[in-house]
Image (tube, grey):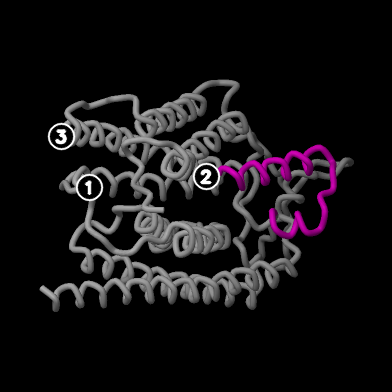
Amino acid sequence: MILAAETNASLAQMSNTLVYSSMAVYTLAFLAHIAEWVFGSRSKVGRTAAALTPSKTAPATVSVQVKKAGGTAVLDRPEVITRSAAGTRDVPDGPGAAGGTVKGDLYGRIAVSLTALGFLIEAAGVISRAIAVQRAPWGNMYEFSTTFSTVAVGAYLGFLVAKKNVRWIGLPLVTTVLLDLGLATTWLYSDSDQLVPALDSYWLWIHVSTAIFCGAVFYLGAVATLLYLFRDSYESKLAGGGTPSGFARSVLERLPAAATLDKFAYRVNAAVFPLWTFTIIAGAIWAGDAWGRYWGWDAKEVWSFITWVGYAAYLHARATAGWKGRKAAYIALIAFGCFLFNYYGVNIFVNSKHSYAGV
């Protein structure tokens, strides 16, 4: 028994070392992402401005050169600008964070590689913690936070592997992960220990794991929604004849179009919403086993339901005329804010049956 205890302590220490090591790698990834945007900002893209600011004297045209014997024919055709389903301009997507420069793209590839390495190291830390305590590694807020950031990065890398253009998420993602791990290793840290009796159930694997996955995907949707609001304002200013500042233009020009960001946010939120519904149902079943009742209006239960209502309202707004676009985006951000309060606020500041923060 003494040997087992020493082994557990050794694995727990290894887990801590791996988490700190992942923070160091994520920091390098953060610097590489900064370099990616800085070097990318030197390229003059201007695709959105060209699409939204046609000539005042003649319709915007696109020249098509057709080579043939005896010369080159130049054909002009109008460039049609339409409105997307989300109510935004139908304009080209930006080329990504690197903005088309070779050096910027190189730093971007380095940043993604470092992010992947940080993910592998952090995932090893989470697994080591699980083996050390011989249970699911999310029995307190420290463990939940490290697992949450691991899943968020894993989801981002999964989109990249699926050839989705999501490199623009990299910088805000790595920044958030560093903040999350900084909080986890300082204010939220708890030594490895066994579970309280109420948590000692197989439902811990089912209920909490789905909650972590839902939160990670909701986070990616929230980042896309926030960037959509900035990009939509940028496109509106250009369409109205305004001239955004050079810094704003260099950054926002390289993002996907507002309609693309809005569509991405909608799809990920809509895809994970049924799983969040299952999370609440699974929690109710677990509550029935642990406390003899399925629903007791505990603070965690209430805010989980409020979060559900928020995302249900967002999905309904996206399908309602007059509520698409910015109005629906605001609802999505409010819903994600409810999710964050449900995690941090309820666990730390509210006295409830779910107060297992360990801080």
Rendered location of residue 279, percent (x, y): 29, 38
| Dot 1 and dot 3 residues touching (CB under 8 Å) | no
Disc 3 target residue: 289
Reply yes or no: does residue 161 show up in magenta: no
Residue 278, compared with residue 186, is above or below; it is: above
Q: Which of the two discs, 1 and 3, sits closer to the camera?
A: 3
Q: Which residue is mark 2?
A: 222
Residue lying furthest right: 57
Q: Is residue 235 magenta?
A: yes
Any part of residue 155 in sight: no
- The residues colored magenta run 225-252
Q: Position of residue 139 (x, y in %)?
A: 29, 53
Circle 1 residue: 204
Of the numbered discs 3 and 2, the one sitting upstream in the chain is: 2
Tell whether 351 sits left or right of 133.
Answer: right
Query: 10 Å neighbourhood of mark 2: few (<14), some, or many (≥20)?
Result: many
Instruction: Give the mark nearer the N terminus: 2 vs 1.
Output: 1
Q: Amino acid at mark 1?
A: Leu
Q: Residue at x 61, y 44 (%)?
A: 228
Q: In what element is the residue under mark 3?
A: helix
Kindly identify the residue that appears in the image at 49 percent across and 34 percent down. 335
